[in-house]
Amino acid sequence: MAIYLDNAATTFPKPPAVWQAMEHFMKNIGASAGRGGYRRALAAEEIVFQCRRLLGKLFNINDATRIVFATNATEAINLVLKGWLNPGDHVITTAMEHNAVWRCLKTLEKERGISITVVPCREDGELLLSELDAAFHEETRLLACTHASNVTGTVMPVQAITAAAHRHGVPVLLDTAQTAGAYPIDVQELDIDFLAFTGHKGLLGPMGTGGLYIRPGFDLRPLKEGGTGSVSRLEYMPEGLPDRFEAGTLNVVGIAGLKAAVEYILNQGISRIRSHEEFLTARILAGLEELPAVIVYGPRETARKVGVVSFNIKELAPEEVAYALDESHEIMVRVGLHCAPLAHKTLGTLERGTVRASVSYFNTTEEIDAFLTAVKEIVELTS
């Protein structure tokens, strides 16, 4: 029995309704949204509209036109950072960021002369809030942070972060790649200005989908220009959302799948999904803690993390562990730096990396027990 535990990279399997919706679109609709007045084009447009509406319901966004579709969270993050920041601006981020944020910031540092302050975190990934206020100064224009680390699963104290930023008049960009669909997100309660999300992880949708919520009162420079199917006489991108940021033909087949995925999540309920993933994560942590040769990184309390567990076996390289899990047990995990070198620098694993097991709503207790048995066997073979 093959066991998939790389859900922090992309979730698998998907709800059957996801691929069924995509198949239905390709077989029976196939038209571009917003590009025609005939019935199939209108049906495509309705799919896009309904997906936006459902995402608004999931994230408690009153105006779904403020949700802009993108290919993934990375594109959404690039849209904010490159569309908001100017030469000389200062940005605050954290020591647990993914390269989706970090590489973009470093490029803007080089090309636009922005400055960056990285607020440190503890070894378990917890943000040192005591050092946050001192990071703000007159030129600070944005705070960009992950909602949960893709290395340790550590959930950031978003309400405290946004409160601190807004006291200084600074907006917040939240990267929800590891939380959207698997952890409760309310943009009003969390007081979020920009929310970047991806469709292929906790949202249980297909790759190539995602988007950005832009709070009213904020305007960004478009990341790209082109046709929108609306006010085509204009020589520049229209001002209204979402068209201003959706140049070119949308990935409607992907959006059809994402719509079905969000419907599934809303029907199941975030609390039920979260509870199941917490249960599985606690089981992994308890099992690994019983093995003295295993080093576990990140919080031990499941309330402080999403379903991501990073670990190492003392005498083995992470790659050796992953190979043994796959070759002998058909268990799929991720190894390396997970595109998050800042996080590994915080953990002290920058040179080595970690083995990462990450769960989804579709993993079972039996799969987790099989994984723990396999890790124990690997440990015993090396002792």
Image: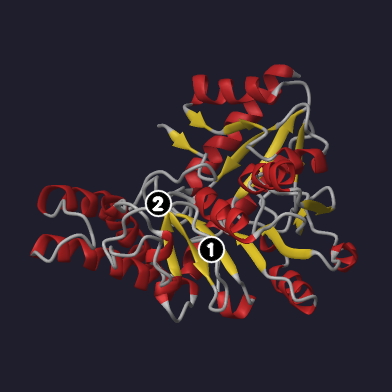
Q: Nearer the viewer, residue 99 or 370?
A: 99
- In which quadrant of the rendered view does residue 231 lie? bottom left
Q: Which mark is residue 336?
A: none
| Viewer-nearest residue: 288 or 57 | 57
Structural crowding at the residue carrying mark 2, measured as other residues with C-alpha within 10 Å and reported as few (<14), some (14–19) or many (≥20): many
> Height in image: 151 above or below 46?
above
**Residue 309 placed where, x, y %?**
65, 44
Q: Residue at x 66, y 41 (%)?
A: 103
Q: Can you tell which mark lies on residue 209?
A: 2
Q: Is residue 91 visible?
A: no
Residue 20: x, y in percent? 21, 51
Q: Residue at x 73, y 41 (%)?
A: 110
Across and down, in percent, residue 284 comes to: 63, 45
**Residue tagged 1:** 274
- Image coords of residue 297 (percent x, y): 75, 43
With respect to residue 226, does 187 lie above or below? Answer: below
Query: Between tags 1 and 2, which lies in front?
Result: 2
Q: Secondary structure at mark 1?
A: helix
User: What quarter of the picture does the N terminus occupy?
Assistant: top left
Task: Say which amino acid is labelled 2.
Answer: Thr
Taking 304 as reference, is 239 left or right? left
Question: Label 2 near label 1: C-beta < 8 Å?
Answer: no
What amino acid type is highlighted by mark number 1? Arg
**Does 117 sit left or right of 74 as displayed?**
right
Report how many numbered discs are placed on residues in the image: 2
Q: Nearer the viewer, residue 22 or 212?
A: 212
Q: Is residue 79 visible?
A: yes
Image quarter where the C terminus lies is top right
